[in-house]
Image: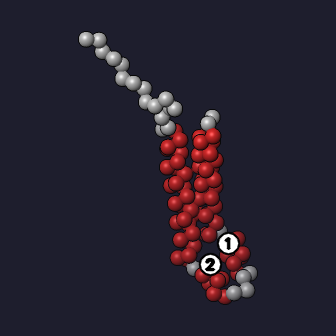
């Protein structure tokens, strides 16, 4: 496996993990408990606002789409020699 392919595969794994975390975690009870402990009321209200949670979840969705895009590029990658030449026809 070439270094470029390995890097792309690790990036896909990162994007999937980060995307799932960002997509799910803002809607869990632990998110609410974590931000209720903040001493600053403005930041607490911002982090617990539904639109802010949706924005973070949307960022997670962007990571998942990016992972699919890079996985598609990885699976469709043309071999190092380029595409195969068409067969020659005799005259």
x%, y% of residue 8? 59, 46
Of marks 2 and 1, which one's residue comes earlier in the chain?
Answer: 1
Q: Is residue 9 visible?
A: no
User: Which of 78/64 is in front?
Assistant: 78
User: Which of 74/50 is in front?
Assistant: 74
The residue lying at 63 percent from left, 53 percent from top is 14
Question: In the image, is 68 to the left or to the right of 13?
Answer: left
Few, some or many C-alpha atoms within 10 Å of disc 2 (few <14, some 14-19, many ≥20)? many
Q: Is residue 75 above or below residue 35?
A: above
Most distant residue in the top direction: 91
Q: Is residue 17 visible?
A: yes
User: Which of 37/87 is in front?
Assistant: 87
Residue 47: mark? 2
Quadrant showing the N terminus = top right
Most distant residue in the bottom direction: 41
Residue, disc 1:
31
x%, y% of residue 82? 46, 31
User: Which of 61/24 is in front?
Assistant: 61
x%, y% of residue 78? 48, 34
Q: Is residue 67 above or below residue 44?
A: above
């Amino acid at each position: 496996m070439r270094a470029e392919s390995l890097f792309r595969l690790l990036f896909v794994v990162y994007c999937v993990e980060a995307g799932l975390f960002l997509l799910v975690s803002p809607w869990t009870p632990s998110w609410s408990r974590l931000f209720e402990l903040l001493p600053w009321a403005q930041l607490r209200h911002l982090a617990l606002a539904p639109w802010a949670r949706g924005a973070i979840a949307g960022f997670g969705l962007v990571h998942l789409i990016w992972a699919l895009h890079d996985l598609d590029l990885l699976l469709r990658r043309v071999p190092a020699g380029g595409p195969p030449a068409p067969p020659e026809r005799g005259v």
